Image (spheres, helix red, strand yellow):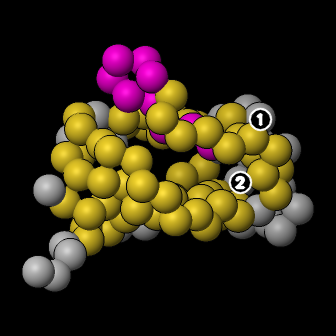
């Protein structure tokens, strides 16, 4: 049976004061890949995904420019995406790939 992977459209966001947050749509599946890219190669930042029950299910700190990680994290519901401690206010691109159930 083929695996159905749903990739959220890459979203462009801009940090203000070194941070940005937004909620995902309701997700039911297995998070397979996280991609977060800053515009500048030397921008450092933290990124996290937090469940609606306030559980941090994914966190990376002190990242420079790019997260491109294949993972397997069960997702169910709405999650808060957060970029924090960015060393520059600039544009970021975020992509989440989910294997649907």
Secondary structure at badge 2 equals loop
Residue drawn at (68%, 44%) of the image: 60
In the image, is residue 48 part of the stretch drawn in magenta? yes
Question: 43 or 15, which is in the foreground?
Answer: 43
Q: CA distance from mark 1 to mark 2?
A: 12 Å
In this rendering, the label closer to the viewer, 1 or 2: 1
Residue 20, image quadrant:
top right
Q: Residues within 10 Å of mark 2 (few under 14, many from 20)?
A: some
Give the residues drawn in magenta, as a range.
47-55
Q: Is residue 92 visible?
A: yes
Residue furthest to the left: 1
Please state the horizontal and vertical placement of residue 77, each as a whole percent of the image. Answer: 23, 35
Question: 23 or 79, which is in the foreground?
Answer: 79
Q: Is residue 12 visible?
A: no
The quadrant of the rendering that contains the N terminus is bottom left
Residue drawn at (54%, 52%) of the image: 13
Residue 83, image quadrant:
top right
Q: Relative to 33, is 83 above or below?
A: above
Secondary structure at badge 1 equals loop
Residue with the mark numbered 2: 90
Please state the horizontal and vertical placement of residue 73, each as a whole percent of the image. Answer: 40, 48
Residue with the mark numbered 1: 85
Q: Relative to 62, is 85 above or below?
A: above
From the viewer's perspective, tell me whether residue 5 is left or right of residue 95: left
Residue drawn at (70%, 64%) of the image: 66
Q: How many marks?
A: 2
Question: 73 or 60, which is in the foreground?
Answer: 73
Q: Relative to 91, is 75 above or below?
A: above
Q: Which of the marked residues, 1 or 2, is nearer the chain's N terminus?
A: 1
Please state the horizontal and vertical placement of residue 50, each as a whole percent of the image. Answer: 46, 30
From the viewer's perspective, tell me whether residue 92 is left or right of residue 22: right
Residue furthest to the bottom: 2
């Amino acid at each position: 049976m083929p695996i159905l992977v749903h990739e959220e459209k890459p979203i462009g966001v801009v940090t203000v004061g070194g941070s940005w947050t937004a909620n995902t749509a309701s997700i039911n599946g297995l998070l397979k890949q996280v991609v977060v890219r800053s515009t500048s190669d030397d921008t450092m930042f933290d990124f996290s995904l937090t469940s609606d029950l306030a559980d941090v299910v994914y966190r990376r700190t002190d990242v420079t420019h790019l997260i491109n990680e294949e993972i397997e994290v069960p997702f169910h519901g709405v999650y808060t995406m957060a970029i924090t401690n960015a060393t520059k206010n600039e544009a970021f691109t975020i992509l989440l790939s989910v294997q649907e159930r």
